[in-house]
Amino acid sequence: MRGIVPPRCSAHGAWQLIRATLLLFAGAWFAAVPAFGQQTDAPADVLGEASLFQEVPRVSAASKYEQDPREAPASISVITQEEIERFGYRTLAEVLNSVRGFFTSYDRNYTYVAVRGFTLPGDYNTRILLLVDGHRLNDNVADAAYVGTESALDLSAVERVEIIRGAASSLYGTNAFYAVINVITRNGRSLQGGEVRADAGTFGAYRARATYGRRVPSGIEFLVGGGLYRSGGADLYFPEFDTPETNNGLAVGLDGDRTADAFAKLTYGGWSFEAGIQGRKKQVPTASFETTFDDPRLTTRDGHAFAFARYDHPFADLSRINVTLAYDRHRYTGTYPYDTVVQRDLQSGDWGSLDAQYVRPIGQRHKVVIGGEFRSNFRQDQALYDVEPYQSYLDDHRSSQVWALFVQDEFRIAPSLLLNAGLRHDAYETFGGTTNPRAALIFNLDHATTLKALYGRAFRAPNLYELYSQDGGLTQKPSGRLRPETIESYEFVAERQLARTLRGTVSLYHFDAARLISIYSDSADGLLVFGNLNRVRSTGVEFEAEGSAGPVAARASYALQHVRDAEQDLAPVNSPTHVGRLGVSVGMLRERAHVSGEFRFLSARRTVLGGRVPPYGLVNLTLIGQPMSRGLELSASVYNLLNRHYADPGGEELAQELVFQDGRVVRFGARYQF
Amino acid sequence: MPVSRLSTLLALVGVALPVPHSRPAPPSTRVLVVVSQDAPPYRAALTSFRHALERGSGSLDVRVVQLGGDPDRVSKVMPQTAQADLVLTLGTLATRESLRRFHTTPVVAGMILSPDELEGSANATGVFLQFPIETELEWLTRLAPTLRRVGVIYHSAETRDRVTRAERLAPGSNLSIQAYRIDGPQELPDALENLADRADVLWGMTDPVVFNPETAKSLLVFSFRHQIPLIGQSTPWVKAGALYALDRDYTDIGAQCAEMAEKILSGKAPNTMPPVPPRKIRYTLNRKTAEQMKLELPERAFRDAAEVVE
């Protein structure tokens, strides 16, 4: 696109804006105190029977995921299964899109997560750590975390999603760079029976799923489920290919998406076993990597399987030990048609891990966590070859091991003051060792207000793709030696219960990420190679309010973020200054039905070519309700209700500077529980 | 007629005819009632105590001292001597203060949590509010028969004794007890975390350090999050989100105290009557919580409940 002007926003201007916004919000924040001040004084000592007659604050199931703001050494958001259903979220990416400071972009193949205004083109979410029930899901070749339809877990198996912001390598190791996303799965007890669901919608999309779970009196609890998803996808027009030779830029029937997945979970006593398998085949309509446009053979296939056994044992002194033994497998196959040949890109990863942690309260003031992790990458293979006639460009077979030790102490300095400090050392065969600390000072100012000062340092180990991928010296050579990326994060968080059902959060943060790995052209030989190149600084402020009044529940957030590439003093690609979210859900017919609306706003972003992606605002609407039949639930969703024409920036591998997204999409669904 | 003769005549008539006059009344029973606080359960118990005792013992001379739940008020309002045939105390504060002052006057204590309050007081008996462990376990198996692993968190030594007893009795009801002792409320999150995978139900034993309005939210949020129903310790807990609670009929507790008082007034020594639990049991059930927890409770459980929270 010509004539696109990159968004300019001087550092001084952004700071002024942040300062002014903070002052305005601080005024409103404290002005709210007299109006909403419902702080409860600490109760006097209660003698005996009086505890039977005291009024007890009512707690509804809806508040079951409220965080206790007093203890968490991070700024955390939780999205519950109830919200997932009510807002009609289809993928983990849509969940993340509802969260303060997060947004995703989609290149019609993979979905990319941006945290606090930061994402790099071609980065398959390697700077976030994705966990399922605490088990790492990032693969061991590209280090990718999948959040779109390629995600290893269907949302119907999800109980809640916990989003933990900030550098957290002190506990989780690599990838816990900007955020950790922990997907907590449902238990058998949450079903106590079966559930079948089906939905269908625009682009010939349909989904079918069955789940069964139960807790039996002996204490055994299990859940099994599986499902299929098919979408014909949109017929798309790409002006970059608008020539008679390339079908006038039309990609018809080339956006198809197919997934299949299964999940099982069994718990008994301290033992739990979990396994999941997922596969996806995606047609790619964008002719990425300079492949032939309008060729249906351009596809990517991803498959991930995991299984783990965990033993968790609490002791009478409130200490506990937790040991997890896991196996993971990831496969990726890219089929890239060129004029004369079809090229195949393969990644195969198999790895096992053993991690253990021991938590022990020491006296009244300390709670210490010590732990370790060992990961053996049995297979980290990459291959790139022409299918016919066969010619290999890359056939790289590797294995490696990683181990780590960590310690964390929660030190209650005073009843209202907590220091949480931790340190973790990771040892890699590729680059050596790295030690990363985290410290959080948490101060409960009063019964309603918590202040947190957070510091963390994290790293991201260079992945195998960055280290060793090449195409036989045609265009790319292996870097061989890369250092880990590092980030230091500073954050100040104020959380306040403004009223009984209204809570506000303000977060002011600064990140400094260095040695970021990206591809460049080596001036010595003109070949592309990965290197530790970029440094990005990010400063921002986020505001969030969530609450409910009668049948209405709402969550609103706004993020003002100022991200700068240190060398160029430019906003990085795909980094908006403003991110706004509003979600409102209204219960009707005695909570038998809900209508939920969501508004998402992103300001302008820079493209890879230095252009500008226009800002956009989207409205999604979902109606969900239980008709007369018990156990039956019907839903209808309209995504992009106003049919806005909007786009995300394309990556380096695309000819498209802008990748336009779907217009209005409708989905109807039914769920029957028995 | 001379006045003197008339007087004589009247005197004679007076002897011969019955003349209305006030016979000396039997002495009324003097009862000192000391009440911890002026709240509905205490009022219900006191009213029913008076009615029952009046029916049995006739006239009552009742003096009520309200402590208003305020220990600082005790010295201002409490008499130093009983000057009564019997002292009825309603509540722990009232009982403790009365037993400290009155060592010989019989004391009937109601609305106390446990019989431990009366330990070492030969002049006292009463009705305590805690249900026997056997009763609690029996109702648990009756109302929620599929919940076998019972989590308990406690702090006090008194509760520890009950927990020990529960651990002994539970296997007989095909139940198991998973108990954690905490040193203070700050340890509650860890204890709950430890119970998350080990308990089917969380039993709210009356332990004010663990179960109070300040900890209620943590307990109930845990309950909903892990779908581990909480057995409340009284109706307010059920209204707040607990699955069910056994509760007491405070009117009947007053009558029960009155029966004990009558026996004492007719000569029975208090120390020959051990303190007893309430004889009537009612329970409150939360249907919404049961549905949320996907518990299939027998419909009869809802029918028989004194109150169902919808």
Image (cartoon, coloured by chain):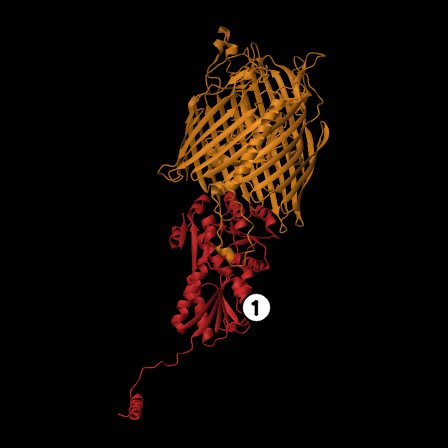
Q: Which of A567 and B143 is in front in this view?
A: A567
Number of residue marks = 1
Q: Position of residue B130 (x, y in %)?
A: 50, 60
The percent position of residue A264, horizontal first and vertical second, equals 52, 37
Which image quarter holds the C terminus of chain A?
Answer: top left
Depth order, front residue of B173/A151: A151
- SS class, disc 1: helix
Q: Which residue lies furthest to the right in this view?
A: A432
Mark 1: give few (<14), some (14-19) or many (20+) Cα within 10 Å: few
Kind of residue sitting beneath label 1 = Arg
Residue A545: percent from left, percent from top: 52, 35
Which of the pair A405/A571 is nearer the observer? A571
| Residue A138 as seen in the image, left or right of residue A192 | right
Residue underneath mark 1 = B100
| Chain in orange on the image | A
Q: Is residue B185 above or below residue A607?
A: below
What is the chain letter for disc 1?
B
The chain that appears red in the image is: B
Q: Is residue B260 above or below residue B142?
A: below
Which residue reaches farthest left? Answer: B1
The residue under the point 52% across, 38% down is A32
